[in-house]
Image (spheres, rainbow, N blue to C red):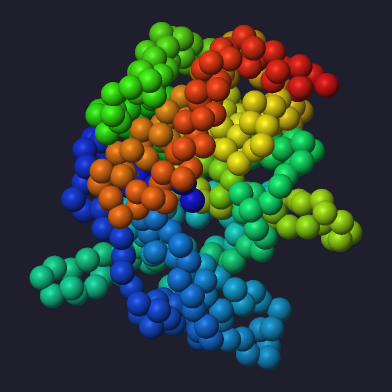
Amino acid sequence: MKTTRTQDIMSSGDGQQSQAFTKPTFTEAQASALVESVFGFKVSKIQPLSSYDDQNFHVHISRSKETTDDPVDYVLKISNMESSRTPDLIEMQNHVIMFLRAAGFPTASVCRTKGDNTISLISIDRGSEIKSYLVRMLTYLPGRPVTEVAISHQQLYEIGRLAAQLDKALKEFHHPKLSLLHRENFIWNLKNVPLLEKYIGALSQGRNREIIEQVIQLFKEEVMTKLSHFRECINHGDLSDHNILVSKSASGDAVYQVSGILDFGDMSYGYYVFEAAITIMYMMIESTNPIQVGGHILAGFESVIPLTPVERGALFLLVCSRFCQSLVMAAYSCQLYPENKEYLMITAKTEWKHLQQMFDMGQKAVEEIWFETAKS
């Protein structure tokens, strides 16, 4: 889950607001009927899960005696109408989830439909029009989101390491439609920071907006010119404090281990250094010592993929740029959905504070803390 979920409004390719962005509104009874008709399972209990632009349900399945070893907890995901127009992309996300699970990562298992597919397109007659939604079901992963627990330096190191391992593993992923992950105008790809200029009008004039304008300008001058020197890979692109689940380790002490990786909806081609920057930014949000976070994430990341000097030199600006993406799109989202303003602004307030602090300290001072911490 992104704290600001506006991506599907923009994912229609040209970056224009799409009228087709419609969150599904299935009742629990309708969702239960879907599980039975599409997947052939009898539902014993169903609960809605919070989600910004799609509809998710936690589903409990009744099992017969012969199948008691099979999982009983699933997440039914009903994509909004805009995402439902790109079934190939969503099917590929499913294949990535299956590939990573086979490689030993804590991703969900994908449930097959009665027709042995990983997704199903269902059409609903709404009277005035027929609406189509993509439906899929994944196993429910145990654990609590990172945002709910206090995590140690060692756990930040492990999360950095996981981010690098994920990108490294995806180098081996092959699929006939892999080119779909070159998402040129996708607003959440870090390469597309200059596209924020279209939405910056959502911010009122003042110091905050000036910082964003400066970051976008610096990005054009100092990052866009160096992209060819970065090493390319597929990015998860949203390893946030909501999308990483942790559970207490089996020994029963207070050590948390990563038990789940969620939400592959922002996956696209990017660079190793992008994943590092995005992970640093999200792990800073809830931290009591945000500037230190980068060093621990970086140490973990570089234990798998050491960054080159050019990549390291861009890290500060990339972290600032991810804050800008999040803040501009949150403000834009508030204009579109005023009813979500309170929810969106809680995180934004913390993000502004961190971005201002990074800006006030300056690149040299922040890098010194990151690189020294990483070294130690």
Looking at the image, the residue that sits furthest to the front is 206
Locate residue 9, reporting x and y percent: 28, 45
What is the x, y in percent for residue 67? 66, 84
Above or below — where is 191 with respect to 123?
above
In percent of width and height, residue 214 lies at 39, 14
In this rendering, the answer to whether 39 lies above or below 90 is: below
In the image, is 47 to the left or to the right of 275? left
Which residue is nearer to you in this view: 251 or 212?
Answer: 212
User: Which image quadrant is residue 166 in?
Assistant: top right
- Residue at the spot x=46%, y=24% of the render? 321
Q: Residue at x 39, y 50 (%)?
A: 342
- Taking depth in this image into account, of 202 and 171 the one nearest to the observer is 202
Viewer-proximal residue among 187 and 181: 187
Which residue is drawn at the image coordinates 68% and 88% (left, top)? 66
Does residue 152 appear left or right of residue 221 in this picture? right
Image coords of residue 30 (percent x, y): 35, 80
As drawn, the residue found furthest toward the right would be 251
